[in-house]
Amino acid sequence: MTPRTSSTLAETSPNRGVPPALGPERPVAWPKRMSVTLPNGLQVVLAESHVFPKISAQLFIRSGNPAIAHRAPGLAELTARVIRTGTTTRSSRQIEEDLRRMGADAGASAGADTSAISIGGLAEFSEGILELLADLARNASFSEDQFERERRQKIEGLRVERTTPAFLANERMRRVLFGEHRYAVIAPTEEQVAAYQRDELEHFYKRHYSPSNALLIVVGDFSTEQLLAQIEEALGSWQGARPELIISAAPPEALGRQVHLVHLPGSVQTQVLVGNLSITRRDPDWYRTVLANSIYGGAFHSRLVMNIREQKGYTYSPRSGITALHQHGFFTVHAAVRNEVAAATLTEIFYEMDRMRSLAVTPEELENAQSYLTGVFSLGVATQDGILGQFSTVYLDRLPEDYLETYREKIRALTANDILLAARRHFDSANAQIVLVGDRDQIADQAALFGPVTEYDAHGNKQ
Amino acid sequence: MTQSSKQLHIPVEHTTLANGLRVVASPDRSAPVVTVGVYYQIGFRLEPRGRSGFAHLFEHMMFQGSANAGKMEHIRLINSSGGLLNGTTNYDITNYFEAVPSNALERVLWLEADRMRALKVDGENLRNQRDVVKEEVRVNVMNQPYGGFPWLDLPPVAFRNWPNAHNFYGDFVDLDAATLADVQHFFRTYYAPNNAVLLMLGDLDPAEAFTFAKRYFEDIPVQPPPPRADVTEPPQTEERRGTVPEKLGPLPALAIGYTAPPRTSDDWYAATILERVLHGGRSGRVYRELVLEKQIALETDGSYDAFDTNGPTQMVTRIFHRPEYTSDATIAAFDSVIRDVQEKGITAEELDPVKVKFRADYYSMLEGGMGSYMPRFGLMHYLACFTLFDGDPKRINTVLDGFLAVTPAQAQAVAKKYLVPRNRAVVVRSPLKEETEKSNGGAR
């Protein structure tokens, strides 16, 4: 023991052996928001947050890469990138200089459900920032040279991604889980990008970047009334029809555990990814499944992290999670481990999964996990981006208006039996799909212990 | 109402406990959340010779158990209070921090005090975390395209003094050599209240927070001041170059680092603004010239740890370039960007917007800084650095003025003085496999 100096605080000196109890909880108040739909169909959500003199805005288009995947996978992503580089009134350089002048950054990208233009900067320039956002959304020019430059960058970026274990694992898992469904493809091939036509991008832009297909969220240091007027000025005259809805094939039903090995020669580690189809946020099981995940592998103090990191030292940052896309969700567990323990890691992943499915969690685990989820949820209220992120979840996924306000009580109301039920329904251990990215010579024998193995190279070719 | 250049004022109160622990509080009651940090003035620069990677390995050990909170208790108690926690090891500081609902403030302080008072770890903990750290190095460096580029590549090329020049993540041989005695010795030497600052931000009353700080920290014994290692570099007389093979990634890349002026000098302000002229996003000169105009590079970025280092530090440009251009051709294109600044200078029309953007970035850093998951991370980080390195946390409200006062002439002068070959190091990452699998790349 380290000797202690004599305390001058004898009377208030705490009982050092016991952690202090939590104080009374302060209520969590999400900022009041205004949600309106402009006459042209644009949905607008505004929330004031005055601590820092800046604003964050994000314009979501409810069409992501799957919206055009039947013709050109990844084309929505390149469309977003090219939008960012020029409009009919602004050159690429002018855009960058205008951003800097307003203390602003902008980004544009596309994912599984949406395309988005985000822009944030100093609150004193809110009018100019919104005007620039509107210019990008309405007047992108798709110049030939910016298109070719972005295309080349995209192809080189894909080449780097195909050497990145986590990317390769995610790519394979999506194909395995989603089959013919459009969520199956997370990145195009180089050849597909090389075949894009400039006017296809423009066509996608005209069809999908339309007010009735868009949601604008702005959080920051402004007066709602004033900002709404600025938005009406910048985007009120934007016109366009809603694109038709795309029906995608149903994802396949998984029939037993299978192993999908992506061969990365010379890899000094194995990227382990286990997954199964799961639920969306609109499913009645959502809350209990989130809580079950938090106990299983969704937090630092979770069972899986304790097991394969803190007890066994197999890995640095293992975690599990539910990715809730708009149409379907999926559950995944990932860990990057040294090659010798790839099989041992899978054994523990399934052991912990099966334990969640067989035995009720203890009351202490339940309470700890409830406090964790409700507390961490409330951290988001302290930053503009945290608020924007939560609002986008609510409005993009079309969740009930009181989702944020009732989330904590819904988590608190759950029981150990809810968790057992969620684990049995949604941690599908028997049909889980296993993706391993690593050196075949090091891990093929271990892979075969868990089911029939299919091998691929980094480009997705079957071996 | 028009708002012009609305200046932000951060409330800051600070005190020093009898044992030398500096304590800083910054109230902000807009959300029921507090962020707590403990920063020790020890980083990987000062780890013992023959123990590369030790400061970082030690940081892991601080989560392995203290006198009254056994292994995993620390993590469980923070998580089950509704909070997140982490720690990072830097050049000159190591930090431990938590963001929690504000009703957990006292509990967090109890935990941080417990591990400042006494570390209680055994050989099994050390073996376990050594394994974890090796997997961290594999996932972040060895099995990752461009892993460790350039933060692990540049120091051994740029510097000659071991503290600045060694492998900060650690050679596995050195990690294996670390003993429990090393752990306890390092703890006693550097993890003393008089070598640290405690920060409490957010939904709190400063007077009450100081009372808590006293209650839990003040009787932790003071230690002799840690030895101050000599981190000065011998004068550099010519450009230094090195090559590191890129085992995974297909693109050639290079990093160019210029050793920056000492922190808080007049040149430091000007160099920090100059760095934004060169690197500030897509409007920065390097990206504009190399990626957008000449299209030699596919990606460029810059980094400069101006605030949180207290010794030799570099202003670094990274360039990922097209394989059809050689390294030398790419460097020549970069050099012409630098020469242009040195010879023609920077106009006020260019510099003024850079300063506006600098102010905006400063606010964003204070608000979040590590993504939005850890509120006020940047505010905590800067307050800690201003306290430990400069003895004045209130610089948080004045330091911006120094940057905003930089003139075009000053920016040009530091470009001429510092952006010269004899003050720089260049590292080339050359891919081992050059685009050999093209024929393989068809749709499946």
Image (cartoon, coloured by chain):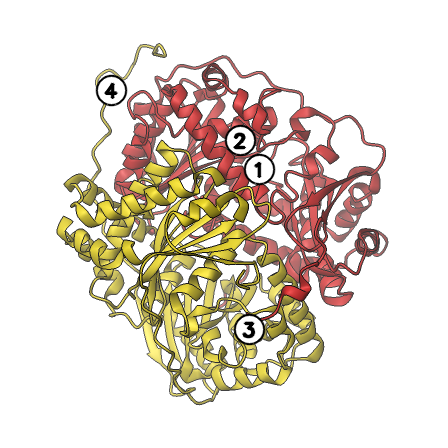
Element at label 2 = loop
Element at label 1 = loop
In the figure, is residue B345 to the left or right of B271? right
The Cα–Cα distance between marks 2 and 4, rounded to whole angstroms, is 30 Å
Name the mark on residue A80. 3
Which of the 4 image quadrants contains residue B296?
A: bottom right
**In the image, what residue occupies the spot 53% across and 67% down?**
A187
Task: For the residues labelled 2 and 1, say whether their Cβ atoms are less than 8 Å apart.
Answer: yes
Dot 4: few (<14), some (14–19), or many (≥20) neighbours within 10 Å?
A: few
The chain letter corresponding to yellow is A
Dot 2: few (<14), some (14–19), or many (≥20) neighbours within 10 Å?
A: many
Amino acid carrying mark 2 in the image: Ile
Name the mark on residue B93. 2
Which of the 4 image quadrants contains residue B123?
A: top left
Query: Residue A403: horizontal and vertical position, in percent?
Result: 25, 64
The Cα–Cα distance between marks 2 and 3, rounded to whole angstroms, is 40 Å
Chain of the residue that carries numbered disc 3 in the rendered image: A
The numbered mark, 2 or 1, whose residue comes first in the sequence reads 2
Dot 3: few (<14), some (14–19), or many (≥20) neighbours within 10 Å?
A: many
